[in-house]
Amino acid sequence: MFRPRFHRTAMIASLLALSLQAAAGEAPVAPAAPVAPVAPEAPASPRYRPLSPDLAGHIERSVMQSLEGLKGLEGLAELHHLERLTELENLFDEGRIEAMVAAAEADADRYAARHAERYGSSDSVGAVIDQKRSLKSNGRVYVNNVAGIVDVSVWDRNEVAIGGRLGSTLETLEILGDSNELNIVVKLPKKSRSSYDTVLELKVPHNARVELETVSADVVINDVKGSVKVNTVSGDMQLVLASPEVSVQTVSGDLKLTAPAAKTTRINSVSGDLELEGLSGLLALETVSGNVELTRGGRFSELKLKSISGDMHLDVALDPAAQVSGQTLSGEITMIVPQALSGTALLKSFSGEAECEGAQTVENHSSRKREYVWGDGRGARVELSSFSGDIRVERK
C-alpha cells in the first residue's frame, strides 16, 4: 500500500521556506513544532547574497504557492487506501523539488551581486555596440547579459555581428575566443550592484550553436539551425528555431517556442507559462506551477511530462510505438490524439475525474485506475496520473 510520509511534507515546506528566506537575505525563522518550542540559536550569516526584492519575490511566490498543495496531503487519511501510484509518489519527493529550487537559487546567486532594479532613464544609456568577429559555420556563441534584451538572428556569413547599446556608461562588453567559440559578456564595474537594460543584437551563422544566460533580460532567437540552450530567471523568451536540439531553463519567465525541426527538447520551469508549437521526437518537460500549451507539430516518439499544479493542454501526433507519460499533483491534463490512433491508455487519479474518448475500457481496476484500448491495442502507450486534477484524453 502507498503510505505517504506526512511528516516529510511539513519538513519539505519548512526546508524550502528557510532556503528562500536565506536567499532573500532574511534571518531564518524556526519552523513550528508540535511540542514546546525551543529557543533557536542565533542565525548564521546568510549563505546567499541578498537578492533584489522583485527577484526574491518571484521565486518565493512561485514555489510556496505550489507547496500549499503538498501540505494539504497531511489531512488525507484516505491515502492509506490508495493503490500505490509510483509516479505520484515521485512528484512530491522532496529531493526532486529541492533540486529544482536549488537550480533556480544557483542561477540567481550567480548574478545577484550585479542584479538590481532596471534603470530606463536616458542618462543611463551607454556606448553603441558595433563589433564583428569571425566564427565557423557551426561554431559556438555564448552570451551573458543580466538585464535588457538579447536578440539573435542568422545570416549567410561565417562571422558574428554584435550590435545594440550598453545600458550604462559604466558597463563594458567583453568579447573573448576565436573562430571556434566566442564568449560575449556584459561586464559591470567591480562591486557594482546595479544592472541596466543592455540591448544586444547578434547575427550568427545559420548552424551556429547558441547558449544564452540572463537574469531579467528577454530573449528573442530566430531561425538558428544549431543547438540552442537558454537559461534565464525572469526574462521572457520568444524562440523560433530550426534547431534539432533545444534546452530551456527558466524560473518565472514565460516561453513561446516554435521548433519544427526539433528532435530533442528539454524544458524546466518553476512558474513560467509554456507555449510550444511544432515539436517532435523527444520532449522532456518539468514545471511546478506554470501552465503548458502544446500545439500539434510532428510526431512524438516519447513524451515525459511532470507538473505540480500547472495545467497541461496537449495536442499531439504520435509515432506508432510512442511512449507517453504525464504526471501531475493538482493540475489538469487534457491530451488530444489522432482519430486513427491505435494503442493503450492507463489513466490513474485519486480524486480527479478521468475520461478517455473513443476507447474501449478493458480493465477497471477501481474508480481511480482504468485501462483503455484504441483499435487493436497495438501501438502507442499512454500513461497519465493525477492526484486531484482531472484527466481527459480526446480524439480528433
Image: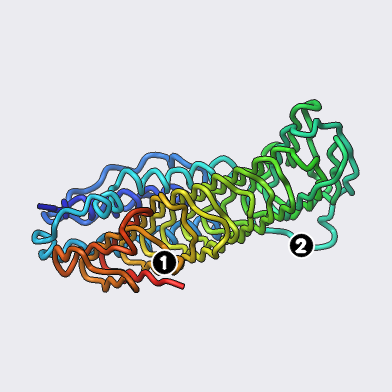
Q: Nearer the viewer, residue 175 or 258?
A: 258
Residue depicted at x 87% and y 42%: 156
Instruction: Confirm or deny contact between disc 2 and disc 1 (CB under 8 A).
Output: no
Left or right of 53? Residue 209 is right
Residue depicted at x 75% and y 37%: 184
Residue depicted at x 27% and y 42%: 41
Please name the residue that numbered disc 2 is placed on: 120
Left or right of 391? Residue 279 is right
Q: In the displayed structure, would residue 152 be above or below residue 396? A: above
Separation of residues labelled 2 and 1 (CA atoms): 43 Å
| Relative image position of residue 303 (x, y in whole percent) | 43, 52
Give amino acid for label 1. Answer: Met
Circle 1 packing at 10 Å, graded few (<14), some (14-19), many (20+), is: some
Please name the residue that numbered disc 1 is placed on: 335
Q: In the displayed structure, would residue 266 be above or below residue 182? A: below
Q: Secondary structure at mark 1?
A: strand
Left or right of 184? Residue 82 is left
| Relative image position of residue 275 (x, y in whole percent) | 56, 63
Label 2 or label 1, whichever lies nearer to me, is 1
